[in-house]
Each structure stands twice: as structure tokens, then as C-alpha cells.
Image (spheres, rainbow, N blue to C red):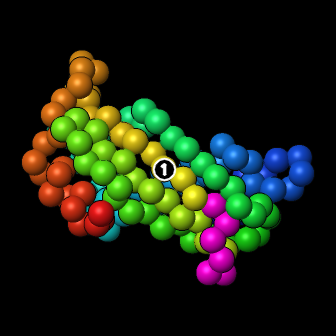
Amino acid sequence: MRVRYADTDASGAVHHATYLIYFEVARVEALRGLGVPAGEFAARGIAMPVIEAGLKVIRPARLDDLLEVDVLLDRVGPASFSFDYEVLRGGELIATGFTRMAVIDAASGGALRLPDWVRELLEGIGA
């Protein structure tokens, strides 16, 4: 991802909240790469909201930096799962983070047990 002006704060560094957007893009693209676009989850009646997130910025990213965001499956539970992220600039680690996702019924918002097809899909991202 290329850092845009809108991604930065008054100091010229990427705003901390922007990293969550970068994590989402990496997560959605990883799932798309496994053959399941984001809309497929909703079509099958499930949603996966982020229920917890964390970030550690090691070095600031700045306007026009080209960043690589790697995503790796961390843990799979009965009704949630989590991803770890590494943000690199030219091969240098500049930030790390995580998100934990719940699995819910898209219509009611009630918690669901992780469907087997989602569990199998997640295995493609690796733990």
C-alpha cells in the first residue's frame, strides 16, 4: 500500500487509526486470495466484526512510503479468530498489530459457532 496524504496526521506520520484500515485491506485481500471475496460471507448469512484490536508502531510511516502488510492467522476459537499483522517498509518491520473477529449472524447479530467452511478457509492463511 502506498501512504496517502489522507493517511497522515499533523506530524506527517501515518495516523495510528489508519493502521486498522491497512489491516482490514490485508485481511480482505488474503481471504480474496483464497477464493472468498468479502461479500461471500454476507451472502452466506454471516458477519465478522472486529471485537478487539492492538497496534505497536516501531517507526513511523510517512507520505508516499510503500508498505507491505503481512497477515497471519493467530488463533481460531469456537466463535472467534484472530490475525497478527506485520507492516514493513523496504523489508524493515515498522509496525505490528492484531485483530480478533467474532462470527455473528448477519441478520440478527447473534453469536454463531464458526462454520466449518470458514475454519477450513482460515487454515489457508496459516497459523
For the N terminus, the image quarter is bottom right
Q: Which residues are magenta?
A: 90-95
Residue at the spot 26% in from the left edge and 29% down from the top edge = 104
Q: In the current view of this chain or complex, which residue is farthest to the left?
A: 116
Q: Is residue 115 above or below residue 106?
A: below
For the C terminus, the image quarter is bottom left
Residue at the spot 77% in from the left edge and 61% down from the top edge = 60
Place of residue 32 in the rendered image (x, y in percent of width and height, measured from the top left):
32, 62
Q: Is residue 75 above or below residue 77?
A: below
Dividing the picture into quadrants, the one containing residue 79 is top left
Whether residue 39 can be seen here: no
Place of residue 86 in the rendered image (x, y in percent of width and height, measured from the top left):
54, 64
Q: In the current view of this chain or complex, which residue is farthest to the right?
A: 11
Q: Is residue 98 above or below residue 49?
A: below
- Nearest the eye: 104 or 6: 104
Side (left or right) of 84 relative to 30: right
Q: Main secondary structure of the magenta part?
A: strand
Place of residue 17 in the rendered image (x, y in percent of width and height, measured from the top left):
66, 43
Place of residue 6 in the rendered image (x, y in percent of width and height, measured from the top left):
75, 50
Residue at the spot 17% in from the left edge and 51% down from the top edge = 119
Q: Amino acid at mark 1?
A: Phe
Element assignment for label 1 = strand
Pointer 1 residue: 98
- Nearest the eye: 13 or 73: 73
Q: Is residue 40 above or below residue 33?
A: above
Q: Is residue 84 magenta?
A: no
Residue at the spot 89% in from the left edge and 51% down from the top edge = 11
